[in-house]
Amino acid sequence: MVSGKRVFVWRASTTVPCQRHTAARTGRPGYHPAVLLKLFIYGYLNRIPSSRRLEGEAGRNVEVMWLTGRLVPDHKTIAEFRRQFEGSENDPGDRFP
C-alpha cells in the first residue's frame, strides 16, 4: 500500500520544472533533479535536515528506495542541490509551509 506521504512527494517532484546539469566528458552523468527533489521533500516531511542522514536513508529505507528508484546520491550531491536552489525563485523549500 502506498502511503499519502509517498504519493505527495511523487506528485510534487513531477510538477516542479528542473533541468539536469550536463556532466563533464570524464565524469558520470548527474542525477535527475526530480530524484534529488523527491529526497529533499522526503527529508522535509520526515524532519531529516542532514544531507548525510538523507544519504543513509536512501540506502536503508525502503520508502526512499521506492521514491528514488534505488539511487543513492552522495551527501555532497544532496547538499549542492540544496545550495543551488537556496534563495532562488525555484527554491523547493518555498513551496511548503
Image (cartoon, helix red, strand yellow):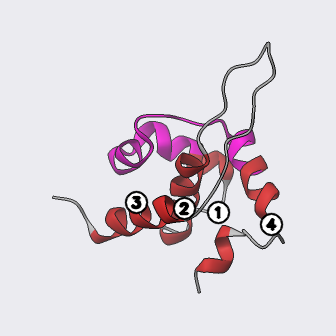
Instruction: Write down the residue under mark 4.
Output: 86
The amino acid on which the numbered mark 3 sits, given as a three-letter code, is Trp
Among the 4 quarters of the image, the one containing residue 3: bottom left
Q: Residue at x 32, y 65 (%)?
A: 7
Q: Residue at x 58, y 56 (%)?
A: 37
Q: Amino acid at mark 2?
A: Gly
- Where is residue 20? Give x, y as percent: 67, 42
Task: Please say if the residues under marks 4 and 1 sit with CB atoms less than 8 Å apart.
Answer: no
Q: Nearer the viewer, mark 4 or mark 1?
A: 4
First-in-chain label (2 vs 4) = 2
Image quadrant in which you'd find residue 47: bottom right
Residue labelled with disc 3: 10
From the image, tell me which residue sits under label 2.
Answer: 43
Task: Check whether the beta carbons of the residues at disc 1 and disc 2 lie within 8 A of each other.
Answer: yes
Q: Quadrant of residue 96?
A: bottom right
Residue 33 falls left or right of residue 3: right
* Secondary structure state at the residue bearing disc 4: loop
Q: Which residue is mark 1?
A: 49
Q: Which residues are magenta?
A: 55-79
